[in-house]
Image (cartoon, helix red, strand yellow):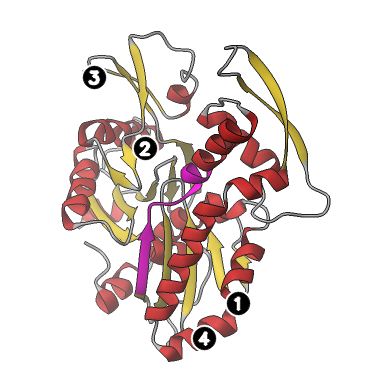
Amino acid sequence: MRCQLLARKIGVDLGTSNVLVYVKGEGIVLNEPSLVALSTDGTRILAVGKAADELIGRAPDTVRVVRPMRDGVISDCAVTEGMLHHFIRKVQGWGRIFKPVIMICVPSGVTSVGRRAVTEAAIAAGAQQAWLIDEPLAAAIGAGLTIAEAKGSAIVDVGGGITEIAVVSLSGTVVAHSIKVGGNQIDDALTEYLKSKHDLLVSGRAAEDLKIAIGSAVEVSEPLVTEVRGRDPNTGRVRSQEVTSNEVAEAIQEPLRQIVSAIRDVLDETPSELAADVFDRGIVLTGGGAQLRGLGRHLATHTGIPFLLADDPQTSVVRGAGLALDNFEVLKRNQGYFR
């Protein structure tokens, strides 16, 4: 018991694109890419996070950079353990005696096998205890929704590899769907559009930079304009192409359609009393992908429900995990969301 009282309490958003760490009493102390640089034989971890990100496109053939998380789920247990160990040690420092107690966010649809893999990786990485909380519930807590009330609150969390949609009430999730559509799939759609429309091959990073610079979910009368650099597949030469935000909106309609469809499915499964609350209150958008220009307007147009962007949406999940540590017993008693 003394170890738990003196241990640091840490919330972790183990995302497909980024790992965020929240320390109780300190706030968010780490936000780095979910990347690990390995030797080609996979036996040595050479760099993690930002350091691994800097090697993309610059490292020799003896180094490969991987994402150990795929669609919010561990795809490589050993590499994920190494990544977690690096980040925990970075947050803990060298002088601490007691291992931390960690709350880790997982997708609502992850299997029991996936949950066990996350828990075991955290313990092996140095956690004294590792608890799991479903991402939509953490996002709702982090966004400041009053989840303890007997009223329906809805959340749409657009991450790198997945989008989570959920309706919560009485500190628990009533209905939740998780789909493998997020910021990465939006980047892929944009990459394919540039290839077919402009005969231009661009990297995933270039597509993401384009999305951040001028990306929009809706077309506007005065679109933003920028240039993107890529390779001409016919000549092999690098060239620039002018692209507008309206073209981006056109390119990404399919992944947006899938998100709209998933939202409708959740609302169809929501009890009528809670659904009425959602229509009155609106739906809160969180996650890094929620920052796409015009996304709330696009979703509102296709669902008939107002959408509200959370403050600092990219950090809602990890802040919720950290806050959940303060309400641990209440949430555990009410819904058993901690495993």
Location of mark 3 (residue)? 42
Give the percent coordinates (x, y) of residue 120: 18, 45
Q: CA distance from mark 4 to mark 2?
A: 42 Å
Dot 3 or dot 1: first in sequence order is 3
Q: Is residue 329 above or below residue 64?
A: below
- Residue type indicated by callout 3: Gly
As for residue 177 lying within the magenta part, the answer is yes
Q: Is residue 215 above or below residue 168?
A: above
Location of mark 2 (residue)? 92
Q: Residues within 10 Å of mark 4 (few under 14, many from 20)?
A: some
Mark in the foreground, 3 or 1: 1
Give the percent coordinates (x, y) of residue 317: 45, 56
Which residue, as the protein is rendered here, is positioned at the far bottom? 273
- Residue type indicated by callout 1: Gly
Q: CA distance from mark 2 to mark 1?
A: 46 Å
Label ID, residue 304: 1
The residue stretch that appears in magenta? 175-186
Mark in the foreground, 4 or 2: 4
Q: Residue at x 21, y 32 (%)?
A: 78
Q: CA distance from mark 3 to mark 1?
A: 50 Å
Do the residues under discs 2 and 1 have CB atoms within 8 angstroms?
no
- Residue type indicated by callout 2: Gln
Mark in the foreground, 1 or 4: 1
Q: CA distance from mark 4 to mark 3?
A: 51 Å
Dot 4 or dot 2: first in sequence order is 2
Which residue, as the protein is rendered here, is positioned at the far right? 222
